[in-house]
Image (spheres, rainbow, N blue to C red):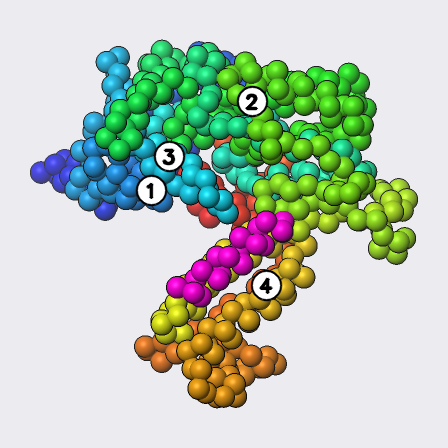
Amino acid sequence: MSRNIVNRRMYDWKAAPWRKLERAVFKLQKRIYRAAQEGNKRKVRRLQGLLNRSWSAKMIAVRQVTQQNQGKKTAGVDGVTALRPSERQPLVRQLQITRKVKAKPTRRVWRPKPGRDAQRPLGIPTMYDRALQGLVKQSLEPEWEAIFEPNSYGFRPGRGCHDAIAAIFNSIKQKAKWVLDADIAKCFDKIDHSALLDKLNTTSPIRRQIRAWLKAGVMDQGTWQTTNAGTPQGGVISPLLANIALHGLETAVMELARTKKEKEKLTVVRYADDFVVMHDDQSMIERAKGVVERWLMRIGLELKAEKTNISHTLEGNNPGFDFLGFNIRQYKVGKHRSGKSPQGTILGFKTLIKPSNKSIRNHKERLSQIVQSHKAQPQVSLIAKLNPVIRGWCNYYKTVVSKETYSKMDQFLWILTWQWATRRHPNKSHHWIAKKYWTPQDWRKWNFIGKAKDGSDIELYRHSETEIVRHMKVKGVASPFNGDLVYWSQRLRKSFLFVFPLSPLGV
């Protein structure tokens, strides 16, 4: 009787001990990471097989795709969306990597690209394939985290775009440099399958399963199409596969530097398919571009000409460059505002990173669209819609020089809300409108505050309320799987952007 109760509780989804399951998975991942660092391939394969058969790992994988992922309500070709708790446990029992590999085609979904009229294709796998991809990713990721290059920051646990920006700042803060700012054309859609599978160098069952996902094809409006290249955007494992395909790019460029001094001058920073190469010699940047183009040809990729530029951080008609929504540039200043070298020498310029003009323009358009779509809505509805957008945008840029930009955005938002209010009451005086929608509070004269149904006040969030907090770049090749719990727990407390893969620290 007691054994049956225990088994029933262990398989009761709502009563599952998630923290214990996460710790069990993390311990295995940490062992895989260390074995990969030691170069013990046999041990890595054995531990990966153990993890792929683990009930804890299967539970975590199913939970991720049915409860936690943003696309949990997006159906694949089978029409299955987020499962009920009673339906998740049967899916856990079905997950298995077998010799008879099968994979259903992905469902093609078109999504608009931010700030552009173009659309990008997403391939949505079935719920079963998503869960199985999550399981395979749990075993592959720690192995590759031990191998990945230090300046790769995209789609990796414990790393983010702000680490990439900090790495760029560290490279140019003491010296003006030439920059190759490049983007890979249709990276996810053109990766050569054979080159990717050869680079994976994994066990036969995992290789066969990944090959089945790559070759499964897509269903676009009821028409099946073959997939001879690329990894489907929308799959759980796709970002990891893209990083594996692009692994080695930094090493290939760094081989141009023959001496230790030259290697210190040359820097490569990559975030997914966007990357920059920096050096103080323009000829070195030209040679690096040629190396990158030849290296990408091996995996079926090429640079996007319209998004690949060579510029200087200080000199020229249009100095600086945009990367990940930030504008990175150096400004000539006098000795009192100039940056200084570690020896105290005046550099004659100041390195500043700000939100890019394109990002500011897109944010303004988003705010305008929200206000336009809420012409007839009450004030609290407008505020409730604007606040998350403002907070999200401000949080992304709170690590750089954004105070002036925040003030200008507040002025723009004031104009939008004033136009919204005067349009609603064309026959009322400005004094009456201001008194109705704006409330004096503390030292401020204008506070856009609405009354909720329960009588509480809801205030429009101001951009300038966001405090600037400098971001500390992740150390070298550090990874959450290295077991340094002290470092990662401290980083978790200090960095508002840090996301741990399975939160095994208990903090």
| Res 409 label | 4
| Res 448 label | none
Determine the residue positioned at 23% across, 30% down. Answer: 222
Three-letter code, disc 1: Gly
**Disc 2 packing (10 Å; few <14; some 14–19; many ≥20):** many
Q: Secondary structure at mark 2?
A: loop
Image x and y of residue 401, in percent: 68, 54
Q: CA distance from mark 1 to mark 4?
A: 31 Å
Q: Is residue 373 left or right of residue 302?
A: left
**Disc 4 packing (10 Å; few <14; some 14–19; many ≥20):** many
The residue at which mark 3 appears reads as 122
Q: Is residue 421 left or right of residue 135?
A: right
Q: Secondary structure at mark 3?
A: strand
Q: CA distance from mark 3 to mark 4?
A: 33 Å
Residue situated in front as seen by the camera: 357 or 457:
357
Three-letter code, disc 3: Leu
Determine the residue positioned at 57% across, 66% down. Answer: 412
Image x and y of residue 227, in percent: 35, 20
Residues at marks 1 and 2 touching, judged by CB atoms closer than 8 Å: no
**Disc 3 packing (10 Å; few <14; some 14–19; many ≥20):** many
The answer to which of marks 2 and 4 sits earlier in the sequence is 2
| Res 302 label | 2
The residue at which mark 1 appears reads as 71
Residue situated in front as seen by the camera: 242 or 409:
409
Determine the residue positioned at 78% across, 23% down. Answer: 283
Q: Secondary structure at mark 1?
A: loop
Q: CA distance from mark 3 to mark 1?
A: 11 Å
